[in-house]
Every structure is written in structure tokens, then in C-alpha cells.
Image: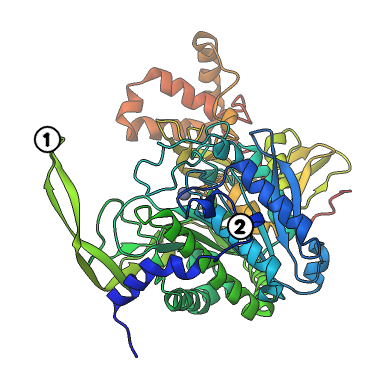
Amino acid sequence: MSISYSQLFWAGALAWFLFWPGPLAAQWQTRFEQSEGRQTVSYAEGMDFYEKLARAYPQTIRLVPQGLTDSGLPLHTVVFSYDGNFDPAQVRAQNRPVWLINNAIHAGEPDGVEATRQLMLALAQNPELARQTVVVAIPFYNIGGVLNRNQTTRVNQNGPEAYGFRGNARYYDLNRDFIKADSRNALSFAQIFHTWQPQLFLDTHVSNGADYQHVMTYIATQADKLGGPMGHYLRLFFIPQLEQKMADRQFPMCPYVNAYGRNPFPDGYPQFYDLPRYSSGYVALFACLGFIAETHMLKPFAQRVAATYALMRSMLEMSEAEGAKLTDLQKKQYQSQAQKDSLKLDWEVRKDTARRIAFAGYASRRIPSRVTTGERLFYDRTQPVQGEIPFYEFFSPIRPVQKPMAYILPQAWTEVLERLQASGVQWKRLRQDQEIPVEVYFIENYQTRTAPFEGHYPHFNTEVRSEKQLLTFQKGDYVLWVNQPAGRYLVETLEPTAPDSFFNWNFFDIILQQKEGYSDYVFEDLAEQLLKEDASLRTQFARKMQEDQAFAQNPEAQLDYIYQHSVYREPGYRRYPVFRLHQELPLATE
Ligand SMILES: [Zn+2]
């Protein structure tokens, strides 16, 4: 029997009853069950639930504190392991898949908090559900945000009655913080992630934006950007299977509707580009399939929780069926990354090719606003529309870079080193002072955002030129070999032209300001002498005067040109202080 699309959605609307855990023993009930899905647990209630669960099922469930958050409270993971093996190295030796779930990164979006409680209870009571997969869940990631409980900040969201706040204890949006790691939460997350080295990752959210019929949408990490054997597997196998499982569970899902406030029907929409600053983009740097669950904000809370739980059960089934494949693919992904001598740093969506996806929306039109003098968007829920629309999920690389053999990072840059360490970068240190021929970048051009963004004024459109130089490095400076599991992370953070590079996130701004200078009237005489003695400089200067009208009328710029092209130029000014090493050297490292 075939069922129509609208029947599917009708079933989906009821499905939360089907997924309702049923009459729970009183000890496992929280305010979520007692309010029939209208409320979500507080931080204390949620942690209390897991403490009780770990006490009742010590063979399979563990609650582990791991690192601090900006709130002052520690992060916790709840770990389920069928055979009671909670040691990450042993789990790897057993070739078992690890699935990491992150909740409440945006604390106003607590669907995953409840779904994860249901999942962990189901696993404890029926461990056969996951004989292979070790399930590691962060029950509350943005603890500061969860503690900042309120009833108003998610103005467009249909429940729960009270929830946390998006910003963390220091007002950071943690889902922009995975590379710059301003928060202690991000550094602790990196430690958890690299302790477990999962093959599969899920971060749970609630959408903003357009109205449509789907309860569940998702962002998968961009498959072309992920690349390698995992990229193919994600696009050709994992996503279609996962979509099928969700349709079977009466929650047909489609990719996150990346068309803010606009009905994409029938125009289609592009895939969300998950830069490494986002959770799914960060984990993709480490051979992990990253997923973001985005339930639809206008659907009732209980129904959204049911959809999130259905997605979790579907992902768990995938992980159980595909466990050996996933662990094998992770190894192959690292091998394939090591074999490439170039890496693509940035991507743009292709409009010439698309996947046709089944989409169920509502007719929309623009009508006069009764509040403002403008027009407003209006979705007509009495007119559901459905059919196939284009989804632009193919991306082209736009910024390839040759990988060096290694980077050399002087020990002075402690903030960068702290982040590299948290992300599992392995290094060697120079045992003595040493002269090394390196490729040096100079920052030629960059633009800077004029409004603050997440505590920064990030740069973009950064351009470099490079030079070979013989530089003296100091005992204790760091040599970072690119051929290591964190190699891709190194390239995407240390190449200044990469969109989420440490340079673009302002970690090296200090080199953009000259420290010394000259007095015009003193340097004038020296400049005259320099021009006289240096024929090549004289020719360059004359050509510049001829070719550049503005320059020819700007005496200050003319004098500065001679200074910048002389031996008096400040060597470190705009010289990017991470150096590229291209050949094997008899490096004395310890
Ligand atoms: Zn969110």
C-alpha cells in the first residue's frame, strides 16, 4: 500500500504519541513527562536523572566530568557501552564505532536534551539496541546558557514553557567557537572529541526561518568539502539511508531550509556551508560524519522531541549496521588526506547541478503589513504544497593551497599552541637554536569586518605573497608535521587565507602594526643616497612614479616606498609568524 505525502505528515503530527516512552516508572519521570511534554528539565534535574541512571545501571552507563565551562561548572559526558568497556583506546582496539551527541549548544533549543534522556534510558533498559556502538552524549554543552532560564528569548518557538539562552556564560555563541575557542567550553569539547575520536557526530538544534511541513530537517557536513572516501559514502549511502529511516518512522526529513524567511518552493535552496567554526565543520576536519538536527520551531515541543528521538534511533541503527564500515572508513579517510599534496581551503555552491528532493511546504505570498509601512511574508497553512525541488548540494573548491611538510611555530604564540594542543595536534620541539630555510608569508591584503562578530573583528579576503628565507629559530620552538591525524586541522587554521584561519580570527593582528618608523627629515638624506647607490631600486621607483598617478603626487608615500624597499624595513612587519617547511631537514628535535 502506498501512502500519500499528506498522509505521511498527518502521521508525523501524531507520531510523538507513538514514540512517547509510555508509562515510565516514577523514578524516571521528570517535569518533561509530568507536563506531557510542555516543559524541559532544568540543569539540576537533568544531571540528577543521569546520576540516578548511572547508579541504577553501572554496568553500561557512566557519567563522566570532563573539562570546565565558562559557567564554572564542569562539562559531563554520559557514556553507554554494551560490554562495560569505557576506555576509549580499548574501544578503538575493538574496532567499535563511537557516536558523539552534543546537546543544548543553543540552550533555548532543548529538544536533544529530552531526546538524549529518552535514548540513554532506552539503552540502559534494552542494551541490545547498541551492541557495537559506544554512545557518548554531552547532556548540556552550554551550561551557562541552560542556567540562564527564561520564557522570552525564543520568541518564535513553540515551547517548551521555559528554556535556556543562546549565549553562554560570557555571551558567546558556542556554535561559532570551535576554531577560535574563546570559551572554555570549546577547549573542553575538543578534549572530549579527541579522547573518543568518534566516526559519527550529532548536534541538536531547533530551526529559525521559513515555515514548512517537515518536523525534522538536518545539516550534514558538506560532502565535497569532507572529501575522500567518507565524502562519497556520506552522500551516496549514509544520507539516503538515514532519510529513508526517518520516512519509515513517519518523520520525512529534508535538508535544513537555508532560505531565511522565504518559502523555497519551488525554487529550491542551497546547502548550508558548514565552516570549521561550526560543530559539524570542525568534526569533519577529523574524519567524522557531522550532523546537525534542526527541528522546526513552529511544531510543538513534544513533537520536536519525538522527531529528534526518531533521528537518534535512526542514526543508532545506521551505526550498528555500519560500525565496521565506519571505523574502516575513518582510517581510509586519514590515509587519503595524507596522500594529497594540496588542500582546498574554501568552497562555493554550484548552481549548475542539484539533487531533486521531496519537499513539503506551504504556499506563501507577500501581503501588506498591519504593523509597518512595508509588506510581510505570509504562509498559508491551508494550502500545503509538495513536490520535488532542487537542492544545491554540490560545491566547488575556490582556494587550493600546497601543503607544506611542516609548520614551524615560535613558542611565543601560546594562545595558538593552547588551541592546537586541545585539538590533538602532535609536535616536536627544537632541541637547540637552529637556522632553517623556510617559506615565509607576507600579508599583502585583507579586509576586516566593521562590526564585532563573536568578540572579534574577523578578517576576510586575505591575500599573501611568499618568500624563501633562512631564519634562526630558538630552542623549544614547535615543529608541526602536517602528516598526522590533525593535519587537515593544521592547514585550515594555520594557512592565513583559509576562511577560519587563526589569522582571520585575529590571533596574529599584532603583526599588522609597524613598531618602528623614521623621521621624514632625517630619512630624506638617506633615501637620496639609497636611490643613488641602488640601481634596481632607482628603476622600480621611477616606474612606480610613471605608472601610479596618485603616488606621483604623494611625497609621503614616495618616501615610504623607498623605506619599505630598503634594508631598514622592519622584518617582522606583516610577516606571518608561522613558517612553512618543505624539505626533510636534519632537524634537532626532542
Ligand atoms: Zn541552534
Question: Percent position (x, y) of residue 6?
Answer: 28, 74
| Rendered residue at 55%/47% (across/down) | 105
Residue 373 numbered mark, or none: 1
Q: Amino acid type of disc 2?
A: Arg
Question: Could you say whether the residue bearing mark 2 is in a helix, strand or loop?
Answer: helix
Q: Quadrant of residue 56?
A: bottom right
Report the number of discs.
Answer: 2
Question: Percent position (x, y) of residue 4?
Answer: 29, 80
Question: Which corner quadrant holds the N terminus?
Answer: bottom left
Residue that label 2 marks: 117
CB of mark 2 near ligand 1 (< 8 Å)? no
Question: Percent position (x, y) of residue 111?
Answer: 50, 54
Question: Percent position (x, y) of residue 429?
Answer: 83, 45
Question: Could you say whether the residue bearing mark 1 is in a helix, strand or loop?
Answer: loop
The local crowd at label 1, few if under 14, some if 14 to 19, many if 20 or more residues have their Cα within 10 Å, is: few
Work out whether residue 272 or residue 377 is closer to the camera in this orientation and state it.
Answer: 377
| Rendered residue at 16%/35% (across/down) | 371
Work out whether residue 41 or residue 192 is closer to the camera in this orientation and state it.
Answer: 41
The local crowd at label 2, few if under 14, some if 14 to 19, many if 20 or more residues have their Cα within 10 Å, is: many
Q: Amino acid type of disc 1?
A: Thr
CB of mark 1 near ligand 1 (< 8 Å)? no
Residue lying at the far bottom in this picture: please name it. 1
Work out whether residue 289 or residue 208 is closer to the camera in this orientation and state it.
Answer: 208
From the viewer's perspective, tell me whether residue 240 is left or right of residue 64.
left
Residue lying at the far top in this picture: please name it. 521
From the viewer's perspective, tell me whether residue 312 is left or right of residue 189.
left
